[in-house]
Image (tube, rainbow, N blue to C red):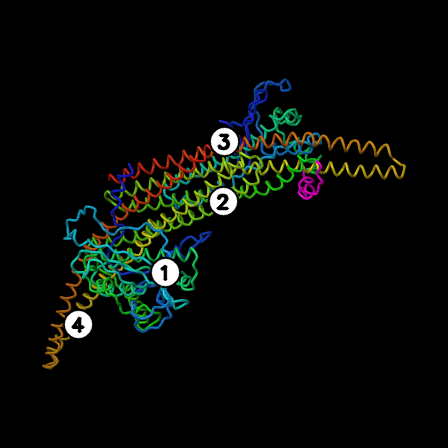
Amino acid sequence: MVRSVSVDLNNDASLVIDIPDALCERDKVKFTIHIKTTLSSFQKSEFSVPRQHEDFIWLHDTIVETEEYAGLIIPPAPPKPDFEGPREKMHKLGEGESSMTKEEYAKMKQELEAEYLAVFKKTVQVHEVFLQRLSSHPMFRKDRNFQIFLEYDQDLTVRRKNAKEMFGGFFKNMVKSADEVLISGVKEVDEFFEQEKIFLLDYSSKIKDATAKAEKMTRSHKNVADDYNHISGAMNSIAADNNTAFKKHLEKCAEVFEKLRKLEDRVASDQELKLTELLRYYTRDIQAAKDLLYRRARALADYENSNKTLDKARLKGKDIAQAEENQKQCLRKFDKLSESGKKELTSFKARRVVAFRKNLIEMTELEIKHAKNSMSLLQGSIEILNSN
Amino acid sequence: ETSKYRSLAGFSSVLFVVLSLVKVFLSQSPEAACLSAEDISPSSNGPRDDDPDDLFAEATEEVSLDSPERQPILSDGPSPAITPVTPVMISPRVDVFDRSPDQDEDEEENRDTFDIQISVSDPEKVGDGMNAYMVYKVTTKTSLSIFSRDEVCVKRRFSDFLGLYSKLASKYMHMGYIVPPAPEKSIVGMTKVKVGKEDLSSVEFVEKRRSALERYLLRTVKHPALLKDPDVLQFLESSELPRAVSTQALSGAGILRMVNKAADAVNKMTIKMNESDAWFEEKQQQFENLDVQLRKLHASVESLVCHRKELSVNTASFAKSAAMLGNSEDHTALSRALSQLAEVEEKIDQLHQDQSYADFYLISELLGDYVRLITAVKGVFDQRMKAWAKWQDAQVMLQRKREAEAKLQYANKPDKLQQATDEIREWEGKVQQGERDFEQISKNIRREVGRFEKDRVKDFRVVIIKYLESLVHTQQQLIKYWEAFLPEAKAIA
């Protein structure tokens, strides 16, 4: 099953990447990257390599810093794995162990495992997609550092440190500041880019909002599941004090609520995986597209400046050749960015549409499945309770 | 398959009458992001608070500033402005009629005695500002002969219900009958209504109260002794009811009750009963446990109600956001799909809201009623202790009188001796009466508790089925909505 929020990025057999496994050790997550390739640039045709989240960030940053890729949408870096929720729960579990019954403890432990699993799924998915975006892109897949990331059979920590010292995240920071102002300030001659600019600026704020609202919705689902859990527990304690047939009745009810909880939890986590994660991812991807517009706007500004410099040089009669060369270069760069930018933004839209379609379909199918399961659980329980 | 449980659920009674002393409790509902916490949790005090910790419970009462003199509700003169409140069909209307086969063997609870239907409806606001109050229509339909007509409608206000409860408690509580507690007062809720806020929370408050009043009456008449009580009959039938005086704020009666409460509290602490009957000891412990457990369950359900409401709000909010995203989306097919997703989520948010009402009216309110009933049951056990103490005190007194008489035998004072002999006889009578009373109340309590437990089981079974059916309905709707959306999602091209 392809887990990606994006298009099925593994359809090119020449370089197939997936993350079949991940291990959580304290604070660090170790991803096992599995590669299958027919490309001659790789030494082996199938192999695996362990990587940490920080390695992904290093790879992302080096790509961002690469001048050559200025006209491309750079796949957004995967967010840091966030195990804060389950970790808190584990802490609570440890503290409250003495005050809980054996059943309560076992139940909480089970919940905890489910939560860990959910966070795991999310983080594996998003790291996997990052790599798959790179591997499916004609230019990124040839990137030297990408190859090192995939092939280098030792720890990348040393390399990471060196890279940080070299670049210091300079370019990355530059892009982040005031990009909206610059982008909207550009006097756009090209109709395509004018449309894209208007679209991206508006869409970016809307999708951020939708992501936040989806997150709240998912959290409410989880709260309801939690309540079912407590109700189940409370019913069980009442049942414990009752004898006779009523006790069995209550225990059955408690069981129903426990099952409802599991279903509600699944609804919540599937909604998160298919909807919220989709929105989160595309919020980041929209930002990457905006970054591209920003770089193009910078290039345009540079070109306009170079024109001014040339005029000045011509007036003064000094350094004309240099100014001419500079102007030519700026124009070349701007044209290159515009050309590749157009291609990138077009394929971006296609990718986005396909991803939304896929995830909305999957989400809907899961919602239907869970609702049907709930219904049969409920109807079955009603029958049993009625017959008692 | 659904028809199977429909026929069983159709005439089931959710309500339940047990006689007891009400002891008002304060339950906490999870505050946090809960929307209308004050409307959901019973937050203030009712009459006859026996809680030893809260001697001044009576101090917070429904501050009704209208004139204290008797004012028949249904006068012929020009009535003050009546604002009918749009009835919100929120709670599932429940039939009181218990036609399900009764497995009663112990008593003559004739099928006939339950042929009575009561509904509380049509809340109307009378007057404005802080003098305003709500009036409810109470309709009784019955074939029982103790009623003068087979259908009668009267108008009653909240304090009338409190007054009824007050009278019943004072008459029956000390005999060991579990008198169903009247619903709680709510300063916040009432003030909003008085002030004229027509918002959703006021409407919900009125509906919540209407439903609670109905359940209260149904429980009351379900008790065979209370059904025949003249005060109950008057309440249901008489078009004019004397204003319930004792529920007014800090009246003479109110202060008296406060004082009694204090005395009771002290007494409870000093009575150490010699329990010879294991049944009572066991039952008392059971009810203590049940009290704790029910409160916990109630709290969890209140939390569910709250979170379900939040889910509804958050879903609605997401729907709006998805609609805006759809508008912004420049790919036509995806844009349409997103708009349709927004519509689905909007329908779902309404589903969640309806479900939260079911959560509330079916389960949460019932549990709240039971927590109060349990308190009443515990009160009845206290009454037995008091009866026992009275009997013991009489025995002690008798002993003293006998000793006094013995002393007087040697003193040769014939007048005093006669008096002493008379007093002995008097106290012998009191001792006998004390023993009889104690035995009677013990017998009553056994019977009452038996009924309580049977009815409690029945109620719970009925309610849980109803509730699960409401969940089934929600899931059915979800399936419908999502199945309608699926082709839209697939149509994205």
Disc 2 residue type (three-letter):
Lys
Magenta stretch? A172-189
Separation of disc 3 and disc 4 at Cα?
97 Å
Residues under numbered marks 3 and 4 in contact, where contact means CB atoms less than 8 Å apart: no
Q: Nearer the viewer, residue B195 or A39?
A: B195
Q: Is residue A196 above or below residue B187?
A: above
| Mark nearer the viewer, 2 or 4 | 2
Q: Amino acid at mark 3?
A: Ala
Mark 3 or 2: in front is 3
User: Can you identify the residue that label 2 sits on?
Assistant: A216
Whether residue B168 appears in magenta in the rendering, the answer is no
Query: The residue marked by circle 2 belongs to what chain?
Result: A
Q: Callout 1: few (<14), some (14-19), or many (20+) C-alpha neighbours within 10 Å?
A: few
Q: Same subunit under labels 3 and 2?
A: no
Q: Which mark is residue B491?
A: 3
Q: Secondary structure at mark 4?
A: helix
Classify B22 as above or below A334. below
Residue, far right: A317
Asked whether, in this view, residue B341 is left or right of residue B117, the answer is right
Q: Nearer the viewer, mark 4 or mark 1?
A: 1
Co-location on one chain, circles 3 and 4: yes
* Most frequent secondary structure within the magenta stretch: helix
Instruction: Calculate the distance from the C-alpha at mark 4 to the C-alpha at mark 1.
Output: 66 Å
The chain identifier of the residue carrying mark 3 reads B
Contact flag, marks 4 and 1 (Cβ < 8 Å):
no
Position of residue B162 measured from the top left corner of the image (x, y, whole percent):
30, 64
Instruction: Report x, y in % for residue A185.
Output: 70, 43
Identify the residue position indicated by label 4 in the image: B400
Q: Which residue is mark 1?
A: B84
Badges 2 and 4, same chain: no
Distance from the alpha carbon under mark 2 to that under mark 4: 74 Å
